Structure formats: C-alpha cells, structure tokens
Image (cartoon, rainbow, N blue to C red):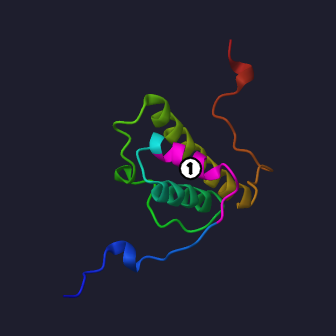
Amino acid sequence: MARTPFPSDTQDKFMLRLPDGMRDLIKQSAERNNRSMNAEIIVALEMFLGVTGGKSLMDYDDPSTFNLSGLPEEEQLRRIVQSSAQTMYEELKKSLRAPPADISNPPDFPISLDDEK
C-alpha cells in the first residue's frame, strides 16, 4: 500500500548552518510565540523580506494571520509595534521616492492671521 505524502514532503527543504547559540535563541523565541522552530524561522524570514522589499508569501495585514490570544501582553505589544514599524518604514520609503511637492506657490489662507484680535 502506497503511503500518502504529508504536505511537508512536497515543500522545499534547505540545510542551514547557524552560528553558535542561534539555535537556542530561535528555540526560546519559538517557545515564547507558541510556534515550532521552523515556523519561527519562516516568520522571521517573511518579516525580513517584507522590510527589505522582497515579496512576502503571507498577508500580514490580515488579522487572521496572527492569533495573539494566549500570548503574554508584552509579546502582543512587541508584535503590534513591530508590525506598525514595518508599515511606517514602507510608507516612508514610498514617500522618499515620490517627487518633491511643489511649494513655490502656496495657497492663500481664507483668514489672515494679522486680522485676528
């Protein structure tokens, strides 16, 4: 009888050498986030690719992507701040690439500030 392949059997596999101590750091982070070490590495790579302009495979704007319930409050806050910082970074990057605004002819204000008493 042929064995039905597991989803992981069809996924790409990649051997990786880690610097001393990094495996333990990944393990600690994975435990804090209630994930496997593999999932923790994938999330870290996805976040890195998102910040550096790579195409993310997950939709981090979709609230169902991350379930923060059950995590310590400090971890929930860390994730929210990290997500906000990533969004701000992307928006700032876009604005820096945009052409400069033309401020040579500013609009007239309806009320002169000198007329106020």
Residue kind at label 1, given as amino acid type: Ile
The secondary structure that most of the magenta stretch takes on is: helix
In this image, 21 relative to 30: left or right? right
In the displayed structure, does residue 16 sit left or right of residue 10? right
Q: Position of residue 43 (x, y in %)?
A: 51, 56
Percent of width and height locating residue 22: 64, 51
Q: Residue furthest bottom?
A: 1
What residue span does the magenta drawing correspond to?
A: 17-30
Q: Is residue 1 above or below residue 59?
A: below
User: Is residue 83 inside the magenta stretch?
Assistant: no
81 over 59 or under it: above or below: above
Q: Position of residue 59 (x, y in %)?
A: 44, 60
Instruction: Note whether 28 is above or below 73 in the view shown.
Output: below
Which residue does the image show at 57% across and 60% down from the upper left?
45
As drawn, which residue projects farthest toward the left?
A: 1
Front-most of 6 and 75?
6
Q: Nearer the viewer, residue 36 or 21?
A: 21
Q: Which residue is mark 1?
A: 26
In this view, which residue lies farthest toward the front? Answer: 1
The picture quadrant where one finds residue 95 is bottom right
The x, y position of residue 115, in whole percent, is 71, 20
